[in-house]
Amino acid sequence: MQEKAQILSENDIDRIIKRISHEILERNRGSESLVFIGLQKRGVPLAKRIAENIKNFEGAEIETGKLDITFYRDDIGKNIKPTAQITDISFDIEGKNVILVDDVLYTGRTVRAALDAIIDFGRPKSIQLVVLVDRGHRELPIRADYVGKNLPTSHNESVEVKLKETDGEDSVTLVVGE
Amino acid sequence: MNMLSKKSIVDAGSLEPEDIELILSNADSFLEISRRDVKKVPTLRGKTVINLFFEPSTRTRTSFEIAAKRLSADIINFSSSSSSLKKGESIIDTLKTILSMNVDLIVIRHSDSGTVKMIDRFVDIPVINAGDGKYQHPTQALLDLYTIQKRFGKFEGLKVAIVGDFLDSRVARSDMDLFEKMGMEVTIVAPTMFLPEDYSEMNVRHNIDEVIKDTDILYILRMQLERQDRKFYPSVMEYNRFLTLDMKRLEEMKPGSVVMHPGPVNRGTEITDEVMDVGGTLGEKIAIEEQVTYGVAIRMAILYLILG
């Protein structure tokens, strides 16, 4: 038996992304030295939207890349063998403030892998984390710098994020049960 | 679940279409890693791969070595000329020694056809055939497919001409298996002495000029000088007349067509010096260096899919 409850609507998501875009500019005192890296797969469109907002607010074009962390996972060999998606970071991250973007923050293992991967590309000045939803249950000492929505969940629930670019609509839904 | 259908890769013919698709679809990510400043990911940390080469090889061995290292696996090279080892029994003894050292995967090259199949039956760990005798060289065929995919974006209906010593070539056998599996039209260009006894099922031409204008992929085989256990082709001049790719023939090839060769090239025999060194638009037809680059990505994808 599956139960679903919508947590965020299209308008909610839009407001959140605008708010986070402002927060990033505020904390970094403008857009200079910023680069965005979206985590495959739904972090990628989120990163693009934030970069687009910042372009509208400040007129600045910000480099935006994609990162797939498959090869950095700590559970490879445990019967999961995802086909890796494209990693495309075609700019220098040395000395930059890297804004890492993902849809859901859960155990923190994906972010751990992403940090390792990013550092293989160079030594950024800082790495800051944006997540649309933080659902708790961290297994590693990792936190987000910008959170769209804190959503207390239990382990038997899952958070389903849909975005127009990947799924045709914008919504965040809490799914209970199998 | 994304896994290969078998534990080992022994021959190209037994790869399922899904296996081929899976390997090719993973290769792009590994190509990207090879283009980074730091060309290494931690994926296979702690795994041990042994390169067991009973026959000389530079590029295949190096390619596997680079592939394993870029995935953070440890790789050990074990080379031995087949003459110093008696066949059969002593190979098994060598394997027993290696297995006792808890190796995770064996890459094997051997001069006797069928050795890899025998070894695969004997050991529990995965085995990758890096070329055995005149039988098979499946990873070469996979990297050839990947090169074709990158150039043409499709396989169906492409016309391939495989030129040269088909009989002695394990590359040709593996390529033929995969090319036909992917829906390409394969023609063999060779004199009868380079063909198997019964070639009635094969589409054969004896002169490269018969296919040069119409072919999408000119796949030129290496003259296997070390495998000539019968009389060598009459003369290089004779070879040049019927099979060699020279400038005149290169210029006749249609737009978008490519030239491939598994390497190393015997300059002046299969391909002339001028063609090997040609630049410009004609030079873009030569995909030999691409094949080498893509070979590393394909071998990374295979190691990842088997060991990851």
Image (tube, rainbow, N blue to C red):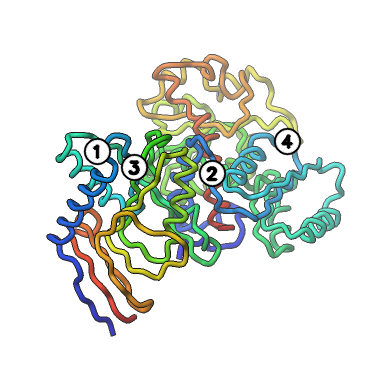
Subunit that carries the residue with mark 4:
B
Residue located at (15% from left, 40% from top): A57
Extreme residue toward the bottom, this view: A1
The type of residue carrying mark 2 is: Asp
Q: Which residue is mark 4?
A: B227
Asked if marks 3 and 1 touch (Cβ < 8 Å), the reply is: no
Disc 4 to disc 1, C-alpha distance: 68 Å
Subunit that carries the residue with mark 3:
A
Which is nearer the eye, B88 or A144?
Answer: A144
Where is residue A26 shown, x and y percent of the image? 24, 45
Q: Which residue is mark 3?
A: A65
Q: Earlier in the sequence, mark 3 or mark 1?
A: 1
Q: Earlier in the sequence, mark 4 or mark 2?
A: 2
Residue B41 horizontal side relative to residue A24, left or right: right
Where is residue A40 shown, x and y percent of the image? 35, 53
Residue located at (57% from left, 62% from top): B6
- Does label 1 lie on the same chain as label 3? yes
